[in-house]
Image (spheres, rainbow, N blue to C red):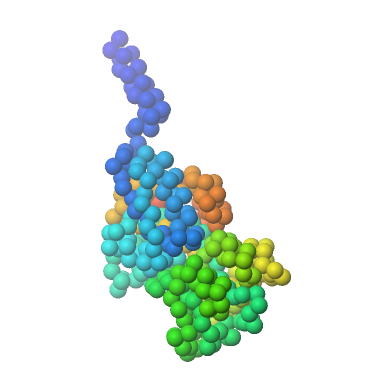
Amino acid sequence: MARIRGSALALAVVTLCALLSACGPDFGGLHLRIAAGTNGGVYYKLGQALASEWAAQLGIDKPEVKETHGSPDNLTLLKEGKADIAFSAADVAANANQPAKGQKLVALARIYDDYLHVVVRSDSPITSLSMLRGRKVAIGSPESGVEVIAKKLLKASLGNYNTADTENLGLQDALDALGRGDLEAVFWSGGLPTDAITQLNKTVKLRLLDIADVLPDVLHENEVYRAATIPASTYQFDGGKPVNTLVVSNFLVVSPAMGDDVAEALVKGLFDAQPQLAKSNPAALSIDVRPAIETAPLELHPGALRYYRENKR
């Protein structure tokens, strides 16, 4: 009789655990801060959506989403302990993870790819990067991932260029200035489409520059970049054509001090939330388990790696 009662009790406990998920890790006291990007950018939109989904999935307070200048700013906050999760472009993460830069960083996932945009007005005479010499251009917020790429492209195209011709502006401020005619080009690295560009095109007709002429040199010197095409249908520019550009992957980056159970739960939540994330921005449509493990030169967090090993597809 005692054995039967013990078996019944054990079955009841197992059933209760299955129903309430009470036997797994308890994240009730977990408070997370996400270093995202500029308001209107893809990082920020996905950060807001992820915060809501993780809160619901893990039963925690909604994580704080920090508006920042971009990838370098995000990783600085992460290293300083002012953020727990950071969006970052692969090139910036690779630079920040060098031994001379201090604390090692690890990745939860590769999430989607950023496409380099060089935006001009459709009535502009500019047709190539080489024509930007002596013209006012916006190269992104100070210490942003956009600035990193913009400077490499300007150097590849122009060699020495006058930094007085460049302005450090966030995306919305830069597009506003372009719309007023105060700038002649805007550099931006983001997912497809970037809403702020779509919105400006409704009132000021725009187009993108093709950078095929400088791609070989840039790709040769920077292994984290790849060549790609922005389809003409992305922004519906008048008379738009597909343009050649470069692509850099984006990672979710954390400290190796994050607990394995937390990291695993966040990765699981990322993929469970993919349909909802795609509603916030189409860039999330490319979030997939198979390419998510491709985070070189950053290593995967052990908790993330555990998830991928248990969920091979």
7 to 70, vertically: above or below: above
Outermost residue to the front: 180
| Residue drawn at (45%, 79%) of the image | 167
Q: Is residue 24 visible?
A: yes
Q: Quadrant of residue 71?
A: bottom left
Q: Nearer the viewer, residue 225 or 296?
A: 225
Q: Is residue 57 left or right of residue 280?
A: left
Instruction: Name the quadrant containing residue 124.
Output: bottom right
Q: Residue furthest right?
A: 239
Image quadrant assignment for residue 208: bottom right
Residue at left offset 55%, top offset 49%:
279
Tell me: 243 left or right of 86.
right
Question: Residue 203 at x, y = what percent?
Answer: 62, 66
Apparent side of residue 73 relative to residue 89 in the rendered image (left or right): left
Q: How many marks?
A: 0
Measured as percent of width and height from the top left, residue 120 is found at 59, 75
Residue 309: in sight, yes or no?
A: no
Comparing 209 with 182, the one in front is 182
The N terminus - image quarter: top left
* Of the pair 313 and 26, the residue shown nearer to us: 26
Give residue 70's position: percent from left, percent from top. Answer: 42, 66
Residue drawn at (46%, 88%) of the image: 162
Q: Residue at x 34, y 47 (%)?
A: 262
In the picture shown, does residue 296 fall above or below 261? below
Q: Residue furthest top?
A: 1
Residue 68 drawn at (x, y percent) = 39, 63
